[in-house]
Amino acid sequence: MDLISYLNDQIEFLTEQFNDAKDKNDVTMRYIVESRLDEANKIKKAIKNGDVTSLT
């Protein structure tokens, strides 16, 4: 699995988790998931912009 596919899967999963936490009014879980979601989106953006070209 390539990195973009992995990130897309993670973003989809985290979005579902975020919405679930929001529906349950679970502030702690929402905060944790939102942080990971933001991180995944930033990595994906860096790849698309060409700032990240390989992993070591």
Image: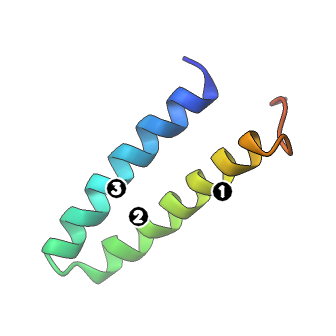
Residue bearing mark 1: 42
Q: At 62% across and 29% down in the image, what residue appears?
A: 3
Between the residue at mark 2 and the residue at mark 3, the CA separation in whole angstroms equals: 8 Å
In terms of depth relative to the viewer, which is nearer, 18 or 51? 51
- Mark 1 or mark 2, which is nearer to you? 1
Disc 2 is placed on an element classified as: helix
Question: Is the C-beta separation of discs 1 and 3 under 8 Å?
Answer: no
Compared across the picture, whether 25 is left or right of 33 comes to left
> Horizontal placement of 27 versus 33: left or right?
left
Looking at this rendering, what residue extends furthest in the top direction? 1
Q: Position of residue 56 (x, y in %)?
A: 84, 29
Task: Look at mark 2 in the image and give the residue it sits on.
Answer: 33
* Circle nearer the N terminus (2, 3): 3
Q: Measure the C-alpha gap from mark 1 to mark 3.
A: 15 Å
Q: Which residue has dot 3 on it?
A: 15
Mark 3: secondary structure: helix
Q: Is residue 7 above or below residue 34?
A: above
Q: Amino acid at mark 1?
A: Lys
From the top left corner, tell me how far across and down residue 14 is, in percent. 37, 53
